[in-house]
Amino acid sequence: MTHGASHGPDTPSRSSRHGRTASRRSTPTHGGPLTQPGTVPPSAAPVAHHNATPGTQPSSAQPTVPLWRRLAALTVLAALAATAGWAFHRVFPGPDLLLAVIPAAIAPAAVAALTRTRPLWLPLTLDLILWPVTTIPLYGALSPTLPADVANAWHALLTTLLPAQPDPELLVLVHTLVWAAATIGAETLSRTTTRITAALPALAVFGVALLLGVDGEGSNLPVTAALFVLIAALALIRDDRSPGRLPAGIPVAAALAGLALVAGPLLPIAAEPYNPRENVDLPPPARVDSVSPLDRVSAWLQIPDRELFTVKADKPQNWRLAVLDRYDGVRWTSGARFQPTGGRVPEGEWTGEADVVRQRVTFDGLPGTWLPAAERPEEVTGVSGLAVDPASGSLLARTKPAKGFSYEVTSRVPKPTREDLLVAAPVHDQALTAFPDGPQEQLFRRLAQQAVKGADEPIKQAYRLQSHLRTSAAYDVTAPPGHSLKGLEFFLQTTHRGTSEQFAATFALMARTLGLPSRVVVGFRPGQESGGIYHVKSGHVMAWAEIKFEGLGWRPFYPTPGRSGAKDDHEVASSAIEESEQLEGEFAKGGSDRPKTTQPQAADQGEQAGGLDPWLLAAVAAGGLLVAYASVVVIVPWRRRHGRRSAREPGERVLGAWRQACDDLGLGGEHALTAGDVVSRQPGDISVHLHPLAEISNFVRYAPEGVTGATASEAWQRSDAIRSAVRARTPLLTRLRARLLLK
C-alpha cells in the first residue's frame, strides 16, 4: 500500500509538513520512528509501543532491564523462597529452621545477580558448589553424609510425630528444597522476561511444606498471605511500569492477602486435609531393652532402697514406665511402634475432663531407655532423640539417659464421671483378647467366670475380677518370679502368693478370657515426698493391668493386694480401689435408672450442627472467585481495546490501532524489535495489513496535526484485519490460555 492510497488527495501536503516536522525534531517520540515511504525504511525503526523509552535504539532483541529492577526482582524472589521454606514451621518450630532457610534462599539469588550475562552452566556450577557450603550452619562443618541425609529425610519426616526434632539430618531437606527453588527461580528471572513464572518453584516448596506439616501446630495462613503479596510485588516489578506506578499495586496485593486469610479456613481441605503419614508404613515393633521391665519387678523388690529417679510434681501419681500388650505364653512384651517426635504426644481416646499434671523427672539409677511419666503424656521437653508410641503414649529415649539427666512432661489424667464408667463398653480388638495356645486357657476361663459370677456388665466384671484377686491371694516379695503360663498356673493353684508381676499378669489373662481387651503396665508408686519432690526407689516398683473401653480409653485396675493383705499402701491405688467398691455398690442397687450413655463431645457436635456447612461456604467462595476472575478476563481486554479505539484525537486512535496489533501478535512485551523485524516475522496474510499500518502510525508520529478521522478508521480496519488473521491461525486453546493470563 502506498502512502497516497492510504490517506487520499491531501497526502502530499501532509508529506511536506511531515518532512518539515521531522527536520525540526531531534528525537522521535514513542520509541523511535516507524517510517513511511521516502523517509527511514521500516526495517530500521523500532516497534511503537506505549511502554518504550523515547529516543532509544536497543542493539539486541533482549530488552534492557534497569539494574534496580533486576536487583529488586531477585530480592523478592529470595524472599519468596525463604517464605515458602518458613512454611515448614509446623514441622520444625523454633529458630533452627532459619539456619536452613536463609542461606539457601540468598545464595542462589546472589549468584544469579553476578552471572546474569554468563553462560547458564556457570551459575549452575556455582550453585551446586555452594549447596553443601550453605549447610555449614546446620552441621557445623561440611558433612560427607549430605546426599544420604537428603534421601533419607523424606521417610524420616513421614514417620515422625510433629513437631520434629531440629536435627541437621532432617532440616537439610528443607534447605535443599529452598535452595532448588531459589536457584531455578533466580535463573528464570535473569534469563527470561516472564513475570511470575519464577515464583512457581517456591510455590511447589510451599505445597510440600503443607503436606509434611498437616499434623503440626500453628497455621500457614499468614505465610499464604505473604506469598500472595510477594508474587504481586514480583509481577509489578517485572511489568516495566514506571517506579511511580508501583505503589498502585499495593491495594491489590493487600486484597489478595486478605482473601487468602479469610477464604483459607473455609475450604473443606482445611478441615480435613490429606495426611500423607496415614499411607506410610511405620517401623515394626522392636524389643526396646534386653530385659523386660516386668522381668525386673522381683529383682527390684529384693533391693528396695536403690534410688531410681525423682519427680517434682504438684500431686502424687503412679509413674508409668512401660506398656506391655503382647503375650506369647512365656513373657509380656511391647508391641509399640515408636516414632520420633519433637515433644508432642498424640491424644488418647478420652476427650472429657482431665487433670493436667506437670512433672520434672530427673534420672538417678533407672536402667534402660524407657522414660517414666504420669498417665498419658501430651508434651515432653528436654529430650533429644525422643520417640513415642502413639497408641500407648509410652516414651523412649534414643540413647540411655545418664545420671542427672532431666526432662519435663505434661500429662492428662482422665476424670470420667460415674455415669461414664457405669455404661462403659469394651472395645473389640482380637489382638488385645488373644490367649496363647495351651491347656491353661480353660483354667483361666473357669476361674474368671467363677470370680465374676452374676456380673453382666463389662465394667462390673472387671471390678469383680480385681476384687477376687485382691482377696484370694497374698502379696509376697519373696514369691518365685516369672509370669509364664506354667508359673501363673502354679500361682493360682498352689502358692496363692506373689508380687504385682503375677497379680497383674494373671488379671490381664483372665480378663482376656472374658472378652475384655487388656494389657500390663509396669511403673512405680509415687515415692517418698520431700519438699514437693517424690523420690522413687526400686521398692516402689509395681505392675497393674488396664482394660480398654469405648470412649474412655484405657482404665487402670489394681489386682495386687496391699502388704497388709487387705488394703493397698499408697493413695493412688487406694483411691482407685475405693472408687471401684463404690461403683460395685451402684450396680448392687440395680441399674434400671442409670443413664444409657454419655458423650463428652456432644457440645462440640451441637455447635458444628448449628453452623454452616463448610463445603457450602467453600463452594460459595470458590464460585465468587471464579465469577470475579471471569469478569476481569472479559472486561480488561475489552476496555483496553475500546479505550484505544475511542480515543479523543485521531492520532491517538491510530497509535492505539498499532498497539492493539502488537498485542494481538503477542509482541506487547518485546519493545526493542524494529518494525522490519515485526513485519518480517509475519506471514503474508498478516504482513499485507501490518506494513501499511506501520506506515500510518509512523506518519502520525511525525505529523500528528494532519491526521483525520478517515486515517484513524483505516488504521483500525488494518488492525481488525490483523486480529482476524491471527485468530484464524491460533488454536482455540492457545487463545484461551492467553486470555486467562490476561495477555
Image (tube, rainbow, N blue to C red):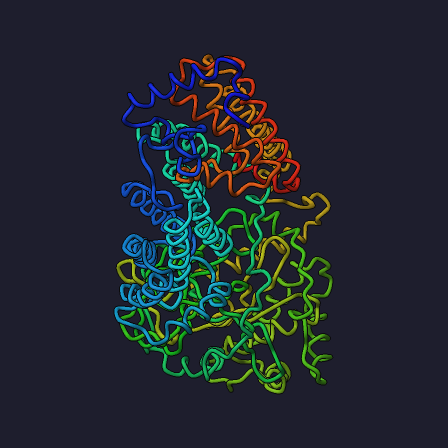
Q: Is residue 610 visible?
A: no
Does residue 61 appear left or right of residue 625 in this picture? left
Instruction: Decide which of 170, 317 is in the foreground and name it.
Output: 170
Q: Position of residue 704 (x, y in %)?
A: 40, 17
Instruction: Decide which of 400, 305 is in the foreground and name it.
Output: 400
Report the number of discs. 0
Does residue 620 appear left or right of residue 347 in this picture? right
Q: Position of residue 651 (x, y in %)?
A: 45, 17
Instruction: Decide which of 587, 300 is in the foreground and name it.
Output: 300
Name the quarter where the N terminus is drawn.
top right
Q: Residue 718 falls in which quadrant of the image? A: top right
Q: On screen, 277 above or below 336?
A: above
Image point (50%, 19%), residue name: 643
Image point (46%, 47%), residue name: 197
Q: On screen, 148 above or below 175?
A: below
Q: Is residue 62 visible?
A: yes
Does residue 74 appear left or right of residue 323 in this picture? left
Image point (59%, 71%), residue name: 469
Q: Position of residue 579 (x, y in %)?
A: 54, 55
Q: Residue 722 falls in which quadrant of the image? A: top right
Q: Position of residue 405 (x, y in %)?
A: 29, 70
Q: On screen, 331 above or below 537?
A: below
